[in-house]
Image (spheres, rainbow, N blue to C red):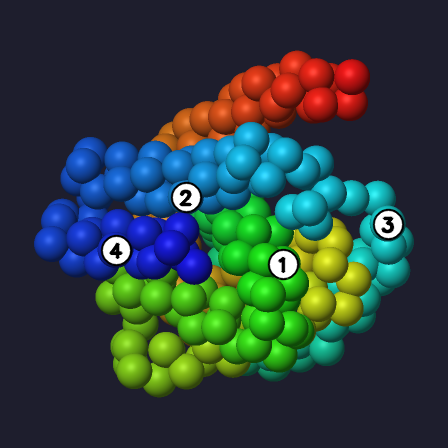
Amino acid sequence: MGAGLVAFALSASLLLLDPESAVAHVIHYGLIYVVCGVAVPWGYTLLVERNAPAEMGLKRERWLISLILSLIVAGLFSPVIIFEADLSAIDWGQFARAAFVLTGAGGLFELFLYYGFIHLRLEKAFGTIPAILVTSAIYVLWHVGTQLPLEADPVAAVWKLFLVGVISQSMFSLTRNLLIIWPIWHVMGVMIDFTVNIGKIDLVSTRLPWAAGAVTLMAITGAALAWVARPRSGQKDG
């Protein structure tokens, strides 16, 4: 929960900055995405708990049913796009760049912090329902300085985000495999936001270099932590 609250505090600090400034991008893509999304969850799981990545939902078990369920639920929401969006007005190249920003960098951040890390540990401590509700509330908080300023009605958006959080966390609790959330379900949420709710594809797409840098640092950080954890695991087994 502390890691989620740190992400919230960093997000809130963005309200005091020019959203397109270098400092804001460093906080958003560096401190929030890389540090809170990978360094803390992976570091705590591998080095403190001395567990494997499977304890963050990165596992083979139930991978197929996770993808099937993700596809089914995403399909249930597809009419929102079909009937409410003007797909002919979309620049799909721009859309692809913006989708990478939110699904590639932002999606991985949410995946590891809110699902693999916070949810699973709250579930062990308090049970499934409290884990779903508390994680969903913490999930809403990190949007304070990122998505909420883009919403026409921020108050209504808070409830919408909480509902999305409850649906997503409930889905995750079915298999506890991250593939039930990412990439299919997460891409559907991004499409609905871009085509129906918020738009702003042009704004988000310009942040592609920062997102690409964040994903690169995420991969390096995760690999480095896994490498550091290997000798300790070997010594423990020996």
Residue 127: where, in percent of width, then height? 64, 73
- Distance, label 3 to label 1, CA atoms, is 15 Å
Q: Is residue 32 above or below residue 147?
A: above
| Separation (CA) of disc 3 from disc 2 | 26 Å
Q: Which of the labelled discs sits on residue 61, or is there none?
A: 3
Alpha-carbon span between mark 4 and mark 3: 35 Å
Instruction: Tell me which numbered mark, 3 or 2, is placed earlier along the sequence.
Output: 2
Callout 4 crowding tier (Cα within 10 Å): few <14, some 14–19, many ≥20:
some
Which residue position is annotated with label 4?
Answer: 9
Which structural element holds mark 1?
helix
Q: Within the image, what quadrant is residue 153 found in? A: bottom left
Under tag 3, what secondary structure? Answer: loop
Q: Label 1 is placed on what type of residue?
A: Leu
Q: Which residue is mark 1?
A: 120
Question: At 63% across and 58% down in the image, what residue appears?
Answer: 120
Q: Is residue 55 left or right of residue 59?
A: left
Identify whether 83 is placed above or below 202. Answer: below
Residue at (29, 82) in percent of width and height:
155
Residue depicted at 59% across the width and 40% down the height: 49
In the rendered structure, are the residues bearing label 4 and label 3 in contact, judged by CB atoms less than 8 Å apart? no
* Mark before the other along the chain sequence, 1 or 4: 4
